[in-house]
Amino acid sequence: MKFPWQFRSLQWLINASLLMFGLMLALALVVHGKLSQGLIEHPIWHHVLQSSTRSVLQSSMADLSDTLPTEGAIRGWLIGANGKLPPDMPAFLGTLEPGYYREGDLDDLADSSPLSGVTSILTPRWGPFSDGADAANRVRSYTALVTAMPQGRLVVAIDLTELEDEQNGSVQLSVLFLLFNMMMIGLVIWWLHVSLARPIKDLARRMRALDPLKPSQRISASYLKRELNVIAEETNAHLERVELAIERERHLLDQASHEFRTPLAIISGAADVLHKQQLPDRAQRPLHRIDEAVESLTQIMEALLYLSREPGPEERRQVTILHGLIPDLVGDHAYLLVGKPVLYVLDTIEPLTVHAPESMVCIAAGNLLRNAAEHTHEGEIHVSVKDGRLVIRDSGSGFDAAQSAYRFTESLKQSGRRPGGAGMGLFLTQRICERFGWHLTLESSLSVGTSATIDFTRSSP
């Protein structure tokens, strides 16, 4: 399963985890505030008010005003039939109809503005952050029970101001704690970006800036974080080992090239001398096989040496006229069809210019022509250049491309078998196409034949 790029970023996962922690903390504080608010609106206050109201109503009418609680948290007032309020009674309590009123209901009556609840909670009542309001003059919080009586209404209320202040103080501390933690989370995210993400991107930029054509390049290990310096130092050590390995391979290729070119030149010269001699007909076929082997091995050596070098800008400046090269290549490979009822057929040859060395184009196209000739025993091999593509389609036996590498390995074990073939030829052609960004396609069927296409306009996937 392939995850989106965000889930594969360590920085994104750390930031998301920190933000999730902040959200969980905020949720916990909200739940804590709800639970503490529930203490103010607990049903126990209703029971206390009912008990106090019953105690007052059990008194005689003459003693009713004397039994009203006038001090402490529980207060009582008697409103006569004329509606006149006692002097020490909050005005908003005098407007209540009979019934039970929770603290939140009375707060809405005392201040009906939409943000009154939030303002009441966040307004400091303690310490140096207090708003300085006089306790006697400020609007206080009550929960009240209003009872209808023949001579008026009995109002019994509990003053919850101090309890609400403590509850609001707890909420305010929680909000401050939340803000402090969110600030710390923001600072940690910023620190991760400055100390981790940005230096890693800088390290990646320095690695991309390394030019493979320039040896002895190293990454500066000058980061403040020791871990990044360890990565830079290990990368430098790896670069040194790679340079040594490349140097050994280049030395080996140079030696092999020198050792192979000398015997190939001798064999080629001896074959030229034999061509000038009057040899019997039975000696012509082995002589042609010698020429073919020398040419194939020379091309293989040239391609391997070229591909072993790092690509440079100069190779893209070389131009090959493909529509002029293909007919010559077809003519050069016509000897492969001698003695077989097979013909090369040139179809549409459109003008096409390829930005690559002519030798590499010759090797890539020549290997495809040779493979077609070796696997076609009768019929025609059609060659065309059209729409930026080289297409070589034969009517031969076809082959399984997945088995080509295996057959090449087996061919090395058989000294009598000719070099080249589907294994090494296709390997070199594919490597050349990858080098220059071409797209090689092989469509082969054991009963129909093989169609090989090099698309010079589209890069390999």
Image (tube, rainbow, N blue to C red):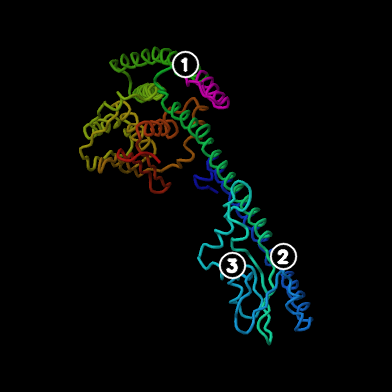
- The residue identified by callout 1 is 247
Magenta range: 218-240
Q: Is residue 413 left or right of residue 277?
A: right
Magenta span includes 225: yes
Foreground: disc 1 or disc 2? 2
| x and y percentages locating residue 297 in the rendered image | 39, 23
The structure residue drawn at horizontal position 61% and vertical position 52%, both measured from the top left corner, is 172
- The residue identified by callout 3 is 107
The structure residue drawn at horizontal position 49% and vertical position 16%, both measured from the top left corner, is 248
- Res. 271 image quadrant: top left
The structure residue drawn at horizontal position 68% and vertical position 79%, both measured from the top left corner, is 154
Pick the residue in front: 193 or 257.
Answer: 193
Can residue 292 be seen from the camera position used here? no
- Res. 389 image quadrant: top left
Disc 3 residue type? Asp
Pick the residue in front: 110 or 235.
Answer: 110
Q: Name the residue furthest bottom.
A: 150
